Amino acid sequence: MSATMTASSRAKRSPVPMNGVDTPALFATINAVAAQPELAKFQFRAKSRWVSGTQSQSSMHSFYGAGSEQTHVAEYTATTDHPGVLCGDDAGPTPVEWVLHALASCLMAGIGTIAAARGIKLNKVEAAVEGDIDLLGVLGLSKEVRNGYQGVSVSFVIDGDASPEELEKIVMQSKARSAVYDIVTNGVPVSIGVKTLAMA
């Protein structure tokens, strides 16, 4: 989703699979969506259930995209909890750590795809992601402190068959096209509905 190239740059060479990316299929997808923009409409879903204490588990299986209902090859699950110091059993990463994972993995996917689209072989990509949070907000001890991260930093180490300037441009292009980066930095409207068993 993160690869954007001009028609002239695409015409310079025939795309070949690279960095684990089926580049010919990528360009075929871009062309198909350009011809039928309605294919770009996707809806992703997660179902979550409370387990105990601060632990919950989410599953992701079905989604809508490319004009029809789709499913992953398997139902994926993610367990979330708090560490003992935050009154949990440490059965999984905290929700805010999953946000860091989502941001890093979205940027990584973009880097791999964009590099492949540009014909650049990657040798190594690593990211260190840090988020600073002040729990005075979450714990209701201060109205001046926000509940979420006060700042997030992402630091990349990247190596590939290109100049340092070209590799940096790939990272910046991934940032420019990352869905999760957009969600984190621009926010998104969220609606919450409630149904009790008595109402069911």
Image (cartoon, helix red, strand yellow):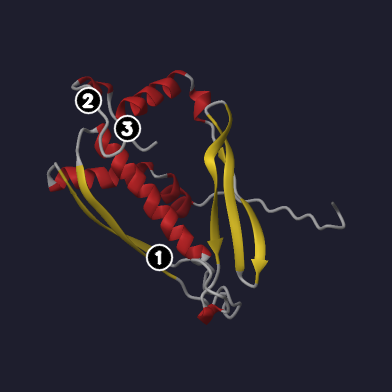
Residue found at the very far front of the displayed protein: 74
User: Residue at horizontal 36%, vertical 26%?
Assistant: 25
Give coordinates of residue 33: x percent, y percent.
Answer: 44, 24
Depicted 142 relative to depicted 44: above or below:
below
Mark 1 to mark 3 CA distance (whole Å): 28 Å
Identify the secondary structure beneath mark 1: strand
Which-is-in-front pick, marks 2 and 1? Answer: 2
Question: What residue does disc 2 label?
Answer: 9
Whether pointer 2 and pointer 3 mark residues with C-beta atoms closer than 8 Å, the reply is no
Q: Quadrant of the N terminus?
A: top left
Identify the secondary structure beneath mark 3: loop
Q: Amino acid at mark 1?
A: Gly
User: Residue at horizontal 68%, vertical 53%?
Assistant: 192
Mark 2 to mark 3 CA distance (whole Å): 10 Å
User: Residue at horizontal 55%, vertical 53%?
Assistant: 77
Viewer-proximal residue among 105 and 187: 105
Q: Earlier in the sequence, mark 2 or mark 3?
A: 3
User: Residue at horizontal 46%, vertical 66%?
Assistant: 149
Give coordinates of residue 2: x percent, y percent.
Answer: 36, 38
Residue found at the very far left of the displayed protein: 163
Question: What residue does disc 3 label?
Answer: 4
Indicate left or right for 5 with 197 as reference: left
Q: Residues within 10 Å of mark 1 (few under 14, many from 20)?
A: few
